Amino acid sequence: MKRILITNDDGFESAGLEALIEAVSDLAEVIVVAPTIEKSASGHSLTLTRPLRFVELEKNFYKLDDGTPTDCIYLALNALFEVDQRPDLILSGINNGSNMGEDITYSGTVAGAMEGVLQGIPSVAFSQVYQGGKESLETQGYELAKKVAREVVMKIFEGEFPLGERKLLNINIPPVTIDECKGFRITKAGYRCYGNDAHPHLNPRGQKYYWIGLHPLAYKPSTDSQISDLEAIDQGYVSMTPIMLDLTSYEDLDRLEKWL
């Protein structure tokens, strides 16, 4: 029987995590290792300054106290699985919110999949885009996201993972119903436009502190024929982006050599 390892940066009690488990639990043996608390925007970070502890909540379901999604995948693979019984697939999500454009460098969801492919296991990150506040997810739900996750996993198990070494699939689901969804688009990572969304406040002692807010999903339109993840979501498509971990700017190697 196939094995799937699942994590989620929104924490072990996330509704998105529950939805992903429901979507694929009959397709494979599912093992869950998720952070104790929300670790959104934790990036590809490992915890090196304090010990971590697995807490088994039920069979094949663990919270990692107090780890990141990267910790969850790294330690699960090296502590919970025998070498010959490692999972066939790693899934990260379903994230509450988008992970598109340069946001993938912040994303704990994408980082979980990054760690999976670094460890040599095919990995997919799923994120559900929503409109308005997070409370809108309560009415929007995850039905489309569950359908997408199930179809993707079945396709992988029926054939093969479509990418090479150290490459992952980053999938974003639009905030529409199953009937409204226009299908899949293969996309590039878009060009996000960021602004200042730091909110200053004063505590009761008069000391200033800040909350980092949420940026709108503003972006630059593509200037070539390849649609971006942000554009696909705006048009009502599921965005599927192949991501590689090699961040080298190859087109600049010669330029840098001449500059030096």
Image: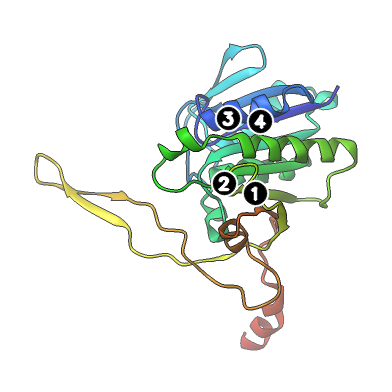
Mark pair 3, 1: CA separation: 22 Å
Mark pair 2, 4: CA separation: 25 Å
Furthest residue toward top: 58
Q: Quadrant of the N terminus?
A: top right
Q: Are marks 4 and 1 in contact (CB under 8 Å)?
A: no
Quick one: label 1, few (<14), some, or many (20+) residues within 10 Å? some
Quick one: label 4, few (<14), some, or many (20+) residues within 10 Å? many
Q: Are marks 3 and 4 in contact (CB under 8 Å)?
A: yes
The residue that mark 1 highlights is 181
Mark closest to the chain's N terminus, 3 or 1? 3
- 205 lies left or right of 147: left
Measured along the vertical axis of the image, is residue 133 above or below residue 37? below
Mark closest to the chain's N terminus, 2 or 4? 4
Q: Amino acid at mark 2?
A: Val
Q: Amino acid at mark 3?
A: Leu
| Residue depicted at 30% across the width and 56% down the height | 198
Q: Quadrant of the C terminus?
A: bottom right
151 or 125, which is in the foreground? Answer: 151
113 or 157, which is in the foreground? Answer: 157
The residue that mark 2 highlights is 176
Mark pair 4, 1: CA separation: 25 Å
Disc sitting over residue 17 in the figure? 3
The percent coordinates of residue 241 (x first, y second) are: 69, 56
Q: Nearer the viewer, mark 3 or mark 4?
A: 3
The residue that mark 4 highlights is 6
Q: Secondary structure beneath disc 4?
A: strand
Furthest residue toward bottom: 258
171 or 141, which is in the foreground? Answer: 141
Q: Amino acid at mark 1?
A: Cys
- 207 lies left or right of 160: left
